[in-house]
Amino acid sequence: MKDFIGSDEIINKKKQYLFPCSHHFYKNPPQLVRGEMQYLYDNTGKKYIDFFAGVSVVNCGHCNPVIVDATINQLKQLQHTTTIYLTQPMVELAEKMSTILPGNLNHSFFCCSGSEANEGALLLARLYTGKKEFIALEGGLHGRTHLTMSGTGIDMWRVDPYISDSFHFIPNVHSHEHTLEKAAKLSIKALKKLLKQKAKDIAAFIVEPIQGNGGIITPPDWYFEEVKKLLTKHNVLMIVDEVQTGFARTGKMFAIEHYNVVPDIMTVAKALGNGIPIAAFCTNDTIAASFNKPSASTLGGNPVACETALAVINYIEKNNLSLRANELGKSLKAGLNNLKEKYPIIHDIRGIGLMMGAELLTKDNSPASEETDIILELLKDNGIILGKNGINRNVLAFQPPLVITQGDIDNVIDCLDNVLSKIDY
Ligand SMILES: Cc1ncc(COP(=O)(O)O)c(C=O)c1O
């Protein structure tokens, strides 16, 4: 076993050897050294309930022994060949994906990150339509590469000084001036107007079914049907980014299934590998046929990642994690709504399944960003790792591994109750 160098030394080495852009949560961050399903442990042996799952990644739990076994077995057998040679796990995963993807989506291109999957999806839309431009939603996040960053509608994640001008943004379905219904109607109105003027240049609309980084923004149930109707009318594709929402998190295998819509292209990453890097963009026969010039990702579809992903999907199905996320999500939401009644700092509770957000506002209705950080720190001191998101970084994010128990939820609600009672705002 390695000697643990401790948090201070890690921070020193980060400063010395990484880039200053690499921030971490907490004033006093623990050194995390071990994971076991829904629990994490630091270098002092302290145990934490992980309620963020490494940003919706470890849906099946940290170091899940069933999945780790599949990874290690393949690792010992054949680790890498690249896609110019034939291996079985990649096609088996693609076949399995076709059974769980919505509607007629049945082709997958495997790569290594959500950004890469979205970049590929945007390229595919250009290849199929022959058009260059895109639509994206304000408050959305799609990645860190040039195009995906350009399609990201959150200022803090748009650091490229030469951002691409290929994107048109339409208003988010959430604003503080309007109800969700009204904001969504205004969003549709703007989409209609834009399509009328520019559809001949627009290849696709890329959108998260539920915005994660944007602050767990859950559109009304009619929104995506309206969007799809309009896009189809104008020959514009719909790319649904399921990087954060996918693989049972919201109580269905994919969040877009709550909205009765089959996208033209869908992207997945994060939870597909449960911590092993794997991602994909997926589409139907017709659109897949347009990507016929040679292309490949060196590590995309490697046997280890694919065997892991197969084990992940099988684990989700066998243990019915969708149902679990649905049921435990309801209990979590009820607990959070009780706290909302008690503590006016909680302005809104939103989300589906185990993708839940609590937006915090101060007494003068401004974002309670500092208070959010204080709450996260106190929760961490009490053994609970929670996330945060939102364009003002004032939304507590509850996105635990889907293997949590009712007891874990009760613990988190009790502890949050205790912490909120100490917050001055
Ligand atoms: C919705 C969404 N899309 C894309 C990405 C980018 O994924 P990655 O960090 O794997 O490149 C993220 C990352 O948080 C995300 O939440």
Image (spheres, helix red, strand yellow):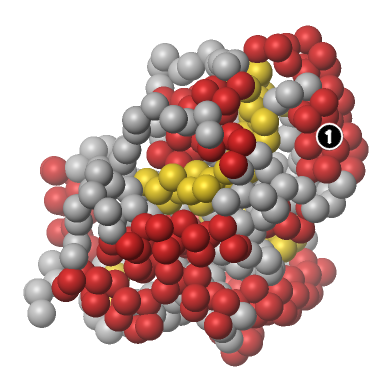
Q: Depth check: give the residue in front, 19 or 109.
A: 109
Name the residue at 34% across, 30% down.
Answer: 294
Name the residue at 75% across, 44% down.
Answer: 365
Task: Locate residue 176, reporting x and y percent.
Answer: 79, 39
Query: In the image as oriented, which residue stretches furthest toward the bottom?
Result: 407
Task: Locate residue 162, reporting x and y percent.
Answer: 42, 14
Name the residue at 46% across, 18% down.
Answer: 163
SS state under label 1 = helix
Task: Locate residue 406, reporting x and y percent.
Answer: 63, 87
Image-based side of 375 in relation to 348, left or right: left
Can you say which quadrant of the picture contains the C terminus? bottom right
The quadrant in which residue 349 appears is: bottom right
Q: Is mark 1 within 8 Å of ligand 1?
A: no
Task: Locate residue 214, reporting x and y percent.
Answer: 61, 43
Q: Depth check: give the residue in front, 243 or 181.
A: 243
**On screen, residue 26 above or below 108:** below
Q: Depth check: give the residue in front, 200 or 173.
A: 200
- Local packing at callout 1 (Cα closer than 10 Å; few below 14, some 14-19, many 20+) is few
Residue on which disc 1 sits: 229
Image-based side of 279 in relation to 257, left or right: left
| Residue 74 in view (yes/no) | yes
Can you say which quadrant of the picture contains the N terminus? bottom left
The quadrant in which residue 397 appears is: bottom right
**On screen, residue 404 above or below 272:** below
| Residue 51 in view (yes/no) | no
**On screen, residue 300 above or below 339:** above
Name the residue at 36% across, 68% down.
Answer: 308
Type of amino acid under label 1: Lys
Give the number of callouts.
1
